[in-house]
Image (spheres, grey):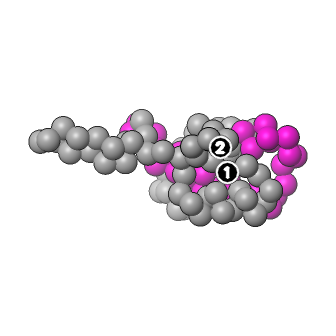
Amino acid sequence: MLENIKTLTGNTDEVLIQLLIDKTKKELESTGKAYSDTWDNVIEDIVIIKINRLNHEGTSHYEADGMSETFVKGYHSYINDQLSALGLPCIGRGRAKLL
């Protein structure tokens, strides 16, 4: 999983990536389900999103002249589709929250 995430993001900070992997596993386990390697694909996708959001504080759009910001809410629908297929709660408004 670590190598896949490094390759897909270009981020080589193994300590950071492993921390995000561990946190994401714990967040998913907090739903009451035990970790399974079938979760690896969705964990990779969530960690990639978390890496991309670092230092952007959830901003999805920013304009300099008009000073406009748009913030990300939840995750893409394909993440929720994967979580649902695994019997895990979806993420978003009124759903499980993963940081």
Q: Residues within 10 Å of mark 2 (few under 14, many from 20)?
A: few
Percent x, y of residue 74: 53, 46
Q: Which residue is mark 2?
A: 95
Q: Amino acid at mark 2?
A: Arg
**Disc 2 on helix, strand or loop?**
loop
Image location (x, y in percent) of residue 40: 73, 58
Q: Residue at x 57, y 60 (%)?
A: 77
Q: Nearer the viewer, residue 44 or 16?
A: 44
Residue marked by disc 1: 90
Answer with the quarter of the image where residue 38 lies: bottom right
User: Residue at image x 77%, y 52%?
Assistant: 88
Quadrant where the image shows the C terminus: top right
Q: Residue at x 44, y 45 (%)?
A: 72
Where is residue 41? Give x, y as percent: 69, 61
Q: What amino acid type is highlighted by mark number 1?
A: Cys
- Under circle 1, the secondary element is loop
- Main SS category, magenta section: helix
Examine the rendering and report whether any part of residue 59 can be seen: yes
| Left-right relation of 6 to 54 | right
In space, the residues marked 2 and 1 are separated at their CA atoms by: 6 Å
**Is 37 one of the magenta-colored residues?**
yes
In this view, 97 is above or below 9: above
Give how far across and how far down residue 22 sits, in percent.
71, 40
Q: Over which residues does the magenta segment extend? A: 27-56
